Image (tube, rainbow, N blue to C red):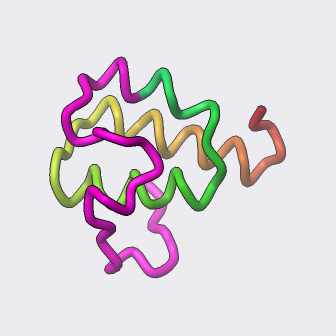
Amino acid sequence: MPECEGESRDPSTGQLPIVGYNHLAGRTAESLFPGLGPEELVDLLRYERAHRNRLPVIRSLVERLRNFRHGEAG
């Protein structure tokens, strides 16, 4: 999985782009990713890796970020 710039910064739950993210089931969280931009996805990825570490969610976030980098998101 690709590393993100400044990965050491770990957003608190109050800074996450999805309210109540830390209480959402994986599939529910993933269903909200399409409405987010790259910076928001990076914040969620950092949080997910540091706190929940759900592999399917991490994979979804990484794939979404790859799509942005290749101009395929939307």
Magenta highlight on residue 10 = yes
**Which segment is the magenta one?**
1-29
> Which image quarter: residue 36?
top right
> Which image quarter: residue 56?
top left
Question: Residue 20 at what x, y percent from top left?
Answer: 29, 39
Please name whichever residue, 62 or 47, is drawn nearer the observer in this view of the structure.
47
Q: Main secondary structure of the magenta part?
A: loop
Q: Residue at x 24, y 23 (%)?
A: 25
Q: Quarter of the image for the C terminus: give it.
A: top right
Furthest toward the right, the residue is 71
Q: Residue at x 26, y 36 (%)?
A: 55
How many marks do you count on the picture?
0
In the displayed structure, would residue 30 be above or below residue 64?
Answer: above
Please name whichever residue, 22 or 52, is drawn nearer the observer in this view of the structure.
22
Q: Is residue 48 left or right of residue 37?
A: left
Q: Residue at x 29, y 25 (%)?
A: 26
Q: Residue at x 54, y 55 (%)?
A: 40
Question: Residue 51 at what x, y percent from top left?
Answer: 16, 54
